[in-house]
Image (cartoon, grey):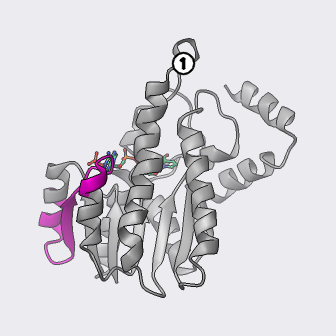
Amino acid sequence: MNILITGGTSGIGRQLAMDYAEAGHNVIVCGRTEAALHELQERYPKQIAGQQLDVTDAEATLQALRSYIDIDLVILSAGVAEYVDIENFNTALFERVYEVNVFGTVRCIEAVLPNLKRGSKLVIVGSTARLLPFTRAEAYASSKAALHYIARSLQVDLADRGIKVLTVSPGFVKTPMTDKNDFEMPMRVSVEFASKSIRRGIEKNKTDISFPRIFSFFLKFMALLPQRCQVAISKRLA
Ligand SMILES: NC(=O)c1ccc[n+]([C@@H]2O[C@H](COP(=O)([O-])OP(=O)(O)OC[C@H]3O[C@@H](n4cnc5c(N)ncnc54)[C@H](OP(=O)(O)O)[C@@H]3O)[C@@H](O)[C@H]2O)c1
């Protein structure tokens, strides 16, 4: 397979890139950090090609990703997390998060869509954080909720073109993103576990690849409760 991964320079995306390369697939790894791209290219010179890319740069994203015409699997994993300080609620934080997580992902979709053929897959990495009103997650989790809605609509609109759209909803995964967190992260899994779950889900065409199973089951169940109950639970967890 020819695979394109954004956010491939770190964390979940990097592990996916290495695992797919190990399995003999050709992987285009996208990200801003040149050193990380070089390191991956050196490790897998036959399998991995680096593409320097900042998804907040609309023109560059369109130009770079439009040039890949024979891709079987696109995994959009580039993302950032920032948490709101309620005493200093500011729009700039939302703009930074949405610029990468929502508009950055949408730009990548715009760029790759014309070249995606029947039978190809588009995988959008969201988060289980979208399921409940978590403390300080107004920007991050809402960006992932927006992404999830976009993906679900694309599942409808791309069905006739034979393009499968899958969503990924991870719980906590140990990566540089979560290493910065100062709160408890129950059932945090390794990047190896995350990559295995995602690759297995993609192979099985799972509409929403959620993991770890018990954690996501628990959150999906709580998301069915009345809103006041969800708020009460989140207040207790805060
Ligand atoms: N870790 C978790 O617990 C967890 C849970 C749920 C969902 N997720 C989601 O999983 C995805 C990967 O997260 P991670 O934990 O692997 O985080 P990470 O280790 O911080 O990796 C984030 C990736 O996004 C890329 N990125 C950030 N800003 C970018 C930009 N402007 N342009 C292009 N690439 C950019 C980074 O590459 P450069 O810095 O090289 O550009 C990096 O490769 C994210 O979408 C995250 O929201 C993670």
Residue corresponding to mark 1: 89
* Residue drawn at the location 45% of the way across and 28% of the way down: 93
Mark 1 nearby-residue class (10 Å; few <14, some 14–19, many ≥20): few
In the figure, is residue 193 to the left or right of 159?
left
Q: Which residues are magenta?
A: 39-60
Q: Is 83 part of what is drawn in magenta?
A: no
Q: Is residue 171 visible?
A: no
> Which part of the image, by quadrant, shows the N terminus?
bottom left
Question: Residue 65: image x %, image y %?
Answer: 28, 66
Percent position of residue 216, x then y = 67, 53
Nearer to me, 209 or 86: 86
Query: Looking at the figure, which quarter contains the C terminus?
Result: top right
Query: 33 or 11: which is nearer to us?
Result: 33
Q: Position of residue 95 (x, y in %)?
A: 44, 34
Q: Residue at x 34, y 75 (%)?
A: 3
* Tag 1 secondary structure: loop
Looking at the picture, tell me which residue is in the foreground, 93 or 2.
93
Q: Is residue 90 above or below residue 114?
A: above
Residue 50 in sight in this render = yes
